[in-house]
């Protein structure tokens, strides 16, 4: 790879935009569709999406809830909320986006039929408090649907890139890449939900395919939307070239006809207030 190609591959102008361009269509839209299918919203219901990011679940749910429904999406990141507001609104329920942490949530008690959280719970600094807030905002009998990734060793493309990062960076600089996958135990999640007061708690492991149609270079570009984006952007061109070569070697077993073919595995929890 030339110096210009390497620099382009690792340039980070906006993590939020990189996330939206790379991860959303290949990962978060398919998983949002699965999450909303599991949540089973009915026309006219209200739904709160916590850690909404660029609003992927919120938009999918709005289409299911119809014009008489209501959707609120919250996220701590103002950049993500701004990105969500820029997306084309679907035909269906109106969506309100709020910049807010998961604890406390700026919504009234018992005001939603459904609460969803797609791959956000593992990042919250106080998980029990966040789950308590979700419980508080649900109406009696309301439903919760939460997705949390399994361990990084169960996500082939991420495991390959993580192996390359650990080979090319000090462990303390590589470790944040694995942060989204650091709460894989379904029993711990189930216990937390039950201790909060949720009933009918069920956790199922779900698997969806993941394909980078642009091959290894496109898979490598996901680093621009990862927790190590700034670390990689600060590397010298020579160090980035070494990382690219190492990542290519680690990803090569997943390459099929020029595409990187893998899958992702998540715990999906449902519960009722």
Image (spheres, helix red, strand yellow):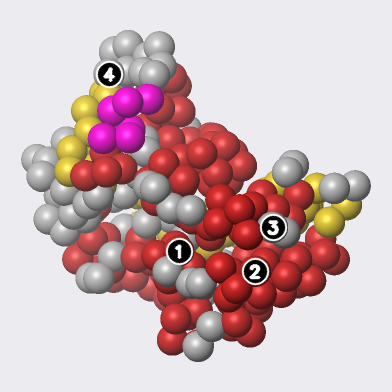
Q: Residues within 10 Å of mark 1 (few under 14, many from 20)?
A: some
Q: Residue under circle 2? A: 241
Is label 3 in contact with label 1 (beta carbons under 8 Å)?
A: no
Give whichever of 38, 152 is nearer the camera: 152
Q: Depth check: give the residue in front, 106 or 5.
A: 5
Q: Which residue is mark 3?
A: 2
Q: CA distance from mark 2 to mark 1?
A: 12 Å
Sequence-first tag of 3 and 1 = 3
Please report the bounds of the magenta region as a residue range. 82-87
Q: Which residue in the structure is indicated by mark 1?
A: 233
Of marks 3 and 2, the one in the foreground: 3
- Where residue 13 sits: x, y (%)? 39, 48
Whether tag 1 and tag 4 are in contact, CB under 8 A, the answer is no
Say which label, 3 or 4, has the lower sequence index: 3
What mark, if any, has residue 141 been given in the picture? Answer: none
Relative to 38, residue 1 above or below: below
- CA gap between label 3 and label 4 equals 47 Å
Q: Nearer the viewer, mark 1 or mark 4?
A: 1
Q: For mark 4, what is the residue? A: 94
Q: Is residue 163 above or below residue 62?
A: below
CB under 8 Å between callouts 4 and 2? no
Kindly report the distance in space between the C-alpha atoms of the residues bearing marks 3 and 1.
16 Å
Q: Which residue is at a point 69% across and 57% down the rendered structure image?
A: 2
Whole-number angstrom distance, CA of label 4 to CA of label 2: 46 Å
Per the image, label 1 sits on a secondary structure element best described as helix
Depth check, mark 3 against mark 4: the one in front is 3
**Residue 47 in magenta?**
no
Earlier-in-chain disc, 2 versus 1:
1
User: In the depicted view, which residue is nearer to us: 272 or 152?
Assistant: 152
């Amino acid at each position: 790879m030339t110096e210009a190609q390497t620099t382009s591959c690792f340039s980070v102008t906006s993590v939020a935009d990189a996330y939206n361009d790379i991860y959303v269509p290949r990962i978060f839209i398919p998983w949002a569709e699965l999450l909303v299918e599991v949540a089973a919203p009915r026309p006219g219901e209200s739904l709160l999406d916590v850690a909404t990011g660029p609003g992927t679940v919120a938009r999918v749910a709005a289409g299911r809830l119809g014009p008489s429904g209501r959707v609120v999406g919250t996220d701590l990141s103002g950049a993500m909320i701004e990105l969500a507001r820029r997306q084309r609104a679907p035909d269906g329920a109106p969506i309100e986006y709020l910049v807010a942490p998961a604890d406390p949530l700026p919504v009234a008690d018992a005001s939603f039929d459904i609460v969803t959280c797609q791959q956000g719970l593992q990042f919250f600094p106080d998980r029990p408090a966040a789950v308590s807030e979700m419980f508080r905002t649900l109406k009696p009998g309301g439903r919760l649907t939460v997705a949390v990734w399994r361990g990084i060793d169960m996500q082939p493309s991420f495991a390959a890139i993580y192996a390359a990062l650990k080979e090319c960076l000090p462990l303390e600089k590589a470790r944040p890449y694995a942060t989204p996958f650091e709460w894989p135990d379904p029993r711990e999640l189930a216990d937390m939900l039950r201790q909060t007061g949720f009933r009918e708690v069920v956790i199922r492991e779900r698997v969806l395919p993941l394909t980078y149609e642009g091959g290894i270079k496109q898979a490598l570009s996901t680093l621009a939307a990862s927790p190590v984006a700034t670390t990689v952007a600060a590397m010298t061109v020579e160090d980035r070239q070494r990382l690219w070569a190492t990542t290519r070697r680690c990803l090569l077993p997943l390459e099929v006809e020029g595409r990187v073919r893998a899958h992702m595995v998540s715990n999906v929890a449902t519960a009722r207030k």
